[in-house]
Amino acid sequence: MSDIPKKRGVRVFKNPIMDRLSRAHPALPAIMWIPALIAALVYGLYSGVAWWAAALLWPAGVFLWTLFEYILHRWIFHFVPHDDERRTSYYLVHQIHHDATEWDRLVAPPLMSLSLGLIFAILFRIVLGPTLMWPAFSGFIAGYLLYDYSHFFMHFRAPKTNFGKRIRRRHMQHHTAYPDRWFGVSTSFWDFVFRTHVRPGERPAKQPEIEWNREFYSDS
């Protein structure tokens, strides 16, 4: 990754510690979550989950992540608060990424990914129980890593496969002309299910003017 741009042009927190915590090196998700992914799968098999059940639960976990990814992007990341004060703080959630793409703000910072991981581990335990949860949770982590690295490489690499080019083109359409379309990143499946895909010949709809109040961040 020697050709990754190193410039950091946007400082979103005056406190240097908080600003550093809002960033993450692209290698960090793999370092943190690949061992967790393997450990969860191995522990599930060791605890008595049959191999055939694990073979079903693991891809189910990946598939569940793709749905969560769509929900997160569409209804949480693109949520627009009505009052100015909340809109200012909410700008950090996602809109800043549309305005300034930086190499170390393209993967989830550890505090965010660990918090979501804990919440979903609890939910998996409630729904599937203390044993069956592990292969499904392992697949869920794999789906998250697929999302994080798909997103990173879409912005800093030119894909060589037709599939990669198609997915990247859709994501760039979301960034440039269709902010209300193509909410899926690692897959466009749910965009077709929920009809948020761009139809052939469709022109961008006029988007409402939203003042996000960017005063709290500045060029460094």
Image: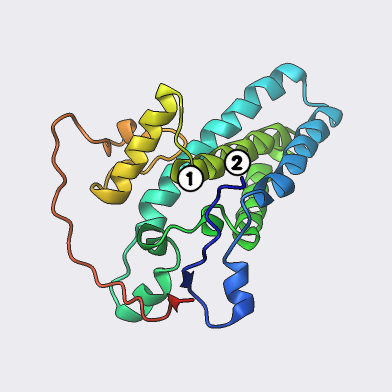
| Model colouring | rainbow
Which residue lies most toward the top here? 52
| Quarter residue 196 falls in | top left
Q: Position of residue 2 (x, y in %)?
A: 61, 47
In the displayed structure image, the side of residue 207 where residue 31 appears, left or right? right
Indicate the amino acid at tag 2. Answer: Leu
Would you say residue 179 is visible in this rendering? no
Q: Secondary structure at mark 1?
A: helix
In the displayed structure image, the side of residue 209 where residue 9 appears, left or right? right
Q: Residue at x 61, y 50 (%)?
A: 26
Q: Residue at x 34, y 36 (%)?
A: 169
* Closest to the observer, 190 or 216: 216
* Closest to the observer, 182 or 121: 182
Question: Dot 1 surroundings within 10 Å: few (below 14), some, or many (20 or more)?
Answer: some
In the displayed structure image, the side of residue 153 where residue 87 appears, left or right? left
**Front: mark 2 or 1:** 1
Would you say residue 1 is visible in this rendering? yes
Q: Position of residue 151 (x, y in %)?
A: 48, 44
In the rendered image of this protein, does residue 213 appear above or below residue 170?
Answer: below
Q: Position of residue 116 (x, y in %)?
A: 60, 54
In the displayed structure image, the side of residue 186 where residue 182 appears, left or right? left
For the N terminus, the image quarter is top right
Q: Identify residue for label 1.
A: 156
Q: Identify residue for label 2.
A: 145
Q: Residue at x 35, y 76 (%)?
A: 214
Which residue lies most toward the front here? 3
